[in-house]
Image (cartoon, grey):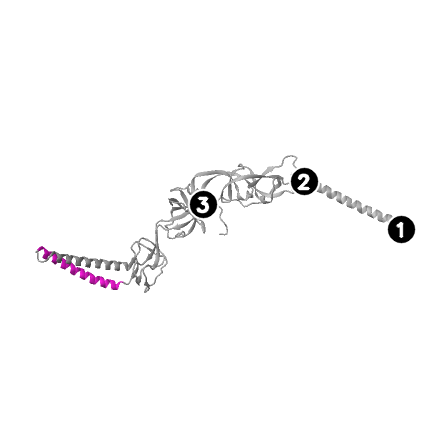
């Protein structure tokens, strides 16, 4: 009996000991939870940038197409067989340079005979005039001689024109395209032989929405860049605007004359796609921040402003490694135009204020943060990709 009593007491002591240990564990956990609740969430490490006031050019962006001052498709006006080709693909030619000669042997033979008939008709007409002066022939005979000479002269002119059209020449100076015919080929009327683009100047055609086009007038400066070579910029100015707005797109067509397009080694050949920047006369002065600092949401754009913690604010003042803890306050802003890696802020932010530029997506209003002092990529107004 005594043994059973001792066993029961031993079991009770073990149960009491285990219960005490569990109670202490739960008490410690509850105390730790209360401390964590009072301390708040751990601070997030973020990158910081200072809002700066800058003056930018006001610009409008568009896409355009390089066009030649003159472009023509070289085609034959009369049918014939190609006898000679006097140009190479891509060659530069002067105005009047021979391009293609069609076989005109038959027309030249006919022209030779027609000239003989004309000369005979001329002699006959001169003789008839002398006889008419002497009263030896009638007026009708003189009229007949005059008519025959005029007809002969017309036949000669017609054949000369045909022979001349068998010789195809450059209508103006320029650079030729790819040759599309061969010697011996029989050409129908209007067969395309090549393309001729004038040199000595160039245009860029583009369009703008009607609201933006109202701000542009002839003389407005433009900059043209090729996407494949963004480091190369050509300057020019607007020289013409279309008289009407496109009723389908509500865009207005414009044309700019661009210096440098006359260079025959230029990459900006007719038909090339280019980016057009129009420079407005008014400047834009605004507070600018890195574009990465902006949090976009359906209810508006915002940034997180770095502020000192106020005394008595819950949470840690410093991290265990000694870094100061700040508060990130969400501030709604009205944005202006972007420029490179920056964006202008028209309302809601002052110059000199520190904003979160890296890590803003993981924050909420009044979240504790610490500043990440590690090197951050510097935003640029004119960024250039390193892997292009």
Find residue 109 and report its image quarter.
Answer: bottom left
Across and down, in percent, residue 244 comes to: 39, 45
Q: Is residue 106 something one can see in this rendering?
A: yes
Looking at the image, is 96 positioned above or below residue 374?
A: below
Point out which mark residue 39 bears: 2
Taking depth in this image into account, of 287 and 380 the one nearest to the observer is: 287
The Cα–Cα distance between marks 1 and 2, rounded to whole angstroms, is 52 Å
Locate residue 315, reporting x and y percent: 66, 39
Q: Earlier in the sequence, mark 1 or mark 3?
A: 1
The residue beneath circle 3 is: 61
Front disc: 1 or 2: 1
SS under mark 1: helix
Which residue in the structure is indicated by mark 1?
4
Pointers 2 and 3 in contact (C-beta within 8 Å): no
Is label 1 in contact with label 3 (beta carbons under 8 Å)? no
Nearest the eye: 352 or 183: 183
Which of the pair 153/10 is nearer the observer? Answer: 153
Element carrying mark 2:
helix
Tell me residue 224's x, y (percent). 42, 47
């Amino acid at each position: 009996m005594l043994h059973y009593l001792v066993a029961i007491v031993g079991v009770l002591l073990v149960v009491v000991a285990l219960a005490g240990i569990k109670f202490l564990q739960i008490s410690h956990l509850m105390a730790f939870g209360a401390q964590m609740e009072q301390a708040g969430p751990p601070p997030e490490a973020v990158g910081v940038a200072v809002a700066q006031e800058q003056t930018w050019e006001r610009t409008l962006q568009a896409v355009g197409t390089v066009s030649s001052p003159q472009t023509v498709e070289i085609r034959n006006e009369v049918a014939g067989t190609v006898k000679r080709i006097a140009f190479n693909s891509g060659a530069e030619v002067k105005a009047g340079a021979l391009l293609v000669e069609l076989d005109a042997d038959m027309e030249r033979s006919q022209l030779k005979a027609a000239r003989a008939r004309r000369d005979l008709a001329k002699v006959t007409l001169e003789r008839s005039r002398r006889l008419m002066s002497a009263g030896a022939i009638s007026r009708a005979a003189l009229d007949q001689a005059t008519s025959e000479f005029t007809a002969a002269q017309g036949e000669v002119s017609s054949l000369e024109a045909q022979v001349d059209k068998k010789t195809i020449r450059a209508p103006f100076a320029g650079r030729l395209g790819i040759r599309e015919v061969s010697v011996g080929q029989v050409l129908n009327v209007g067969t395309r032989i090549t393309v001729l683009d004038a040199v000595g100047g160039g245009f860029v055609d583009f369009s703008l929405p009607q609201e933006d086009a109202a701000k542009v007038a002839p003389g407005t400066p433009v900059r043209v860049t090729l996407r494949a070579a963004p480091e190369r910029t050509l300057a020019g100015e607007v020289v013409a605007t279309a008289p009407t707005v496109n009723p389908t797109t509500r865009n207005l067509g414009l044309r700019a004359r661009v210096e440098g397009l006359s260079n025959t080694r230029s990459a900006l050949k007719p038909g090339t796609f280019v980016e057009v920047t129009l420079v407005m006369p008014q400047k834009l002065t605004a507070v600018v921040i890195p574009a990465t600092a902006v949090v976009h949401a359906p209810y508006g754009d915002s940034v997180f402003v770095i502020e000192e913690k106020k005394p008595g604010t819950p949470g840690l003042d410093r991290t265990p490694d000694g870094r100061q803890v700040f508060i990130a306050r969400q501030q709604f802003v009205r944005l202006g135009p972007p420029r490179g890696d920056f964006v202008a802020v028209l309302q809601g932010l002052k110059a000199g204020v520190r904003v979160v530029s890296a890590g803003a997506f993981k924050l909420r209003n009044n979240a504790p943060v610490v500043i990440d002092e590690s090197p951050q990529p510097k935003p640029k107004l004119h960024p250039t990709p390193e892997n292009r």
